[in-house]
Image: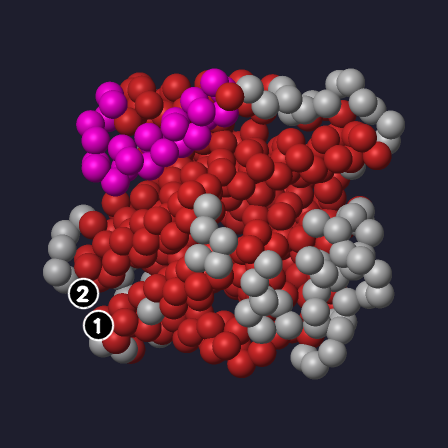
């Protein structure tokens, strides 16, 4: 379905436009704020009166998951669901209200030290239910189990966010880290579901256009089932706070299943097409992420928050960037080919994940310095995205028929 925004205000013509732009801007701003706080303490100083309450590392995790991650999810769902069901895309004032609700939540979190915690919770927790309602109205036009599952996952994300706020308002103890971990593995599960649909399909279409007819990506039902069950099982382990041996064992099996799934998708054949290899590279971080969770839970090989960054930065960050860049081109009637700066942005985010997950263990004496390197790579990657895609997301669609 092409972008209807050739008339009126383009930025409010389709959900992907405003939410992908907000996500890119926030990816830069939230990471910059986190690095600034780390920099102050690295220099031996202290922030006397911060604007956000609670532990800064929890704020950082929350805003990456429920700020950036949820914004990209909103943009994707508000764009994909009309394509699935034929519904009219959310646009105009209703879309503006939804975006304003997301922005109000971000402002409340940034000023949370100055506001009552219950008010911050109400503002922040209001976004996902409203998004779910809007998405459900469209999904129910042509209900299919494979698509309705996203409503359950939105509910799971809400529960994870609710757990974080329960600790912040003093109702529960130690629920914030559980909520953040659950949020990450839930978003990773969405990457597994969506990636399993689009990565082989887009690759197959591109290879066919190039004249390839035999060596195409393949999907095998046993592997497909094992990979999705594995991702669901990992999420359920975090939901139930399962013992380390169970969670670690399930994560190890999930890693193997997803690696096997990817092995049949002809990744090497995409090496000359950044718009394709970015999807494969991001998906590769799923088995890496599940493997690092297994290593953390079974062998105490690394702190679990570090292991979760493989999913958060590599799989979720990489896949959302790849999908945002492709969807924005297709839905604004542009050719499906990214520029060199965008190809560089894919590499910067993937390299940032590599540094964040593995470098501190190899060079522990430079832990904070390496965090700055990883965060800087993330900022550069998304700053490039915002710079290149601002006119695409905020301007009118080109003439022609969009391809996604």
Image quadrant where residue 124 sits: bottom left
Image quadrant where residue 5 sits: bottom right
Q: Mark 2 and 1 residues: CB-CB less than 8 Å, in contact?
A: yes
Is residue 317 found inside the magenta-colored segment of the image? no
Is residue 226 found inside the magenta-colored segment of the image? yes
Position above or below: 91 against 198: below
Position above or below: 49 against 267: below
Q: CA distance from mark 2 to mark 1?
A: 6 Å
Mark number for residue 163?
A: none
Mark 2 = which residue?
169
Give the main secondary structure of the magenta stretch: helix
User: How many marks on residues?
Assistant: 2
| Colour pattern of the rendering | secondary structure
Position above or below: 388 against 111: above
Magenta-highlighted residues: 222-246
Residue 376 in sight in this render: no
Q: Earlier in the sequence, mark 2 or mark 1?
A: 1
Apparent side of residue 344 relative to residue 95 in the rendered image (left or right): right
What residue appears at the point 42 percent right and 60 percent down from the top-left corner? 136
Residue 159 percent across, percent down from the top left: 27, 53
Mark number for residue 118?
A: 1
Image quadrant where residue 246 sits: top left
The N terminus, quarter of image: bottom right
What residue appears at the point 75 percent right and 73 percent down from the top-left corner? 6
Position above or below: 240 against 148: above
Residue 66 percent across, percent down from the top left: 40, 57
Answer few, some or many: residues within 10 Å of disc 1's Cα (few below 14, many 20 plus, some between 14 and 19). Answer: some
Q: Is disc 2 placed on a helix, strand or loop?
A: loop
């Amino acid at each position: 379905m092409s972008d209807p925004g050739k008339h009126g205000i383009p930025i409010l013509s389709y959900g992907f436009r405003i939410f992908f732009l907000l996500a890119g801007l926030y990816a830069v701003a939230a990471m910059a704020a986190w690095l600034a706080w780390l920099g102050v303490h690295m220099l031996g100083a202290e922030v006397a009166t911060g604007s956000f309450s609670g532990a800064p590392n929890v704020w950082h995790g929350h805003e990456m998951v429920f700020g950036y991650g949820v914004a990209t999810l909103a943009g994707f769902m508000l764009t994909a669901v009309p394509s699935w069901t034929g519904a009219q895309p959310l646009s105009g004032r209703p879309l503006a209200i939804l975006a304003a609700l997301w922005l109000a939540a971000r402002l409340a979190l940034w000023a949370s030290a100055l506001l009552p915690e219950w008010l911050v919770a109400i503002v922040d927790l209001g976004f996902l239910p409203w998004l779910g309602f809007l998405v459900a109205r469209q999904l129910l036009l042509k209900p299919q189990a494979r698509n309705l599952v996203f409503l359950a996952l939105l509910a799971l994300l809400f529960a994870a966010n609710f757990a974080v706020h329960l600790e912040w308002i003093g109702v529960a103890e130690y629920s914030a880290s559980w909520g953040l971990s659950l949020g990450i593995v839930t978003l990773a599960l969405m990457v597994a579901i969506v990636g399993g649909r689009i990565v082989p399909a887009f690759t197959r279409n591109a290879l066919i256009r190039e004249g390839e007819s035999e060596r195409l990506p393949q999907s095998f039902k046993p592997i497909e089932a094992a990979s999705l069950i594995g991702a669901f099982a990992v999420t359920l382990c975090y939901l139930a706070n399962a013992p380390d041996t169970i969670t670690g064992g399930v994560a190890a099996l999930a890693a193997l299943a997803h690696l096997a799934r990817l092995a049949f998708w002809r990744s090497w054949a995409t090496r000359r097409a950044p718009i394709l290899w970015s999807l494969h590279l991001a998906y590769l971080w799923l088995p890496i992420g599940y493997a690092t969770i297994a290593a953390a839970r079974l062998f105490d090989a690394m702190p679990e928050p570090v292991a979760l960054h493989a999913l958060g930065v590599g799989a979720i960050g990489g896949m959302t960037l790849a999908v945002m860049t492709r969807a924005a081109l297709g839905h604004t009637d542009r050719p499906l080919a990214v520029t060199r700066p965008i190809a560089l942005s894919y590499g910067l985010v993937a390299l940032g994940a590599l540094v964040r997950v593995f470098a501190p263990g190899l060079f522990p004496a430079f832990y904070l310095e390496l965090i700055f390197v990883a965060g800087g790579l993330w900022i550069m990657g998304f700053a490039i995205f915002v710079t290149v895609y601002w006119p695409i997301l905020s301007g009118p669609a080109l003439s022609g028929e969009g391809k996604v």
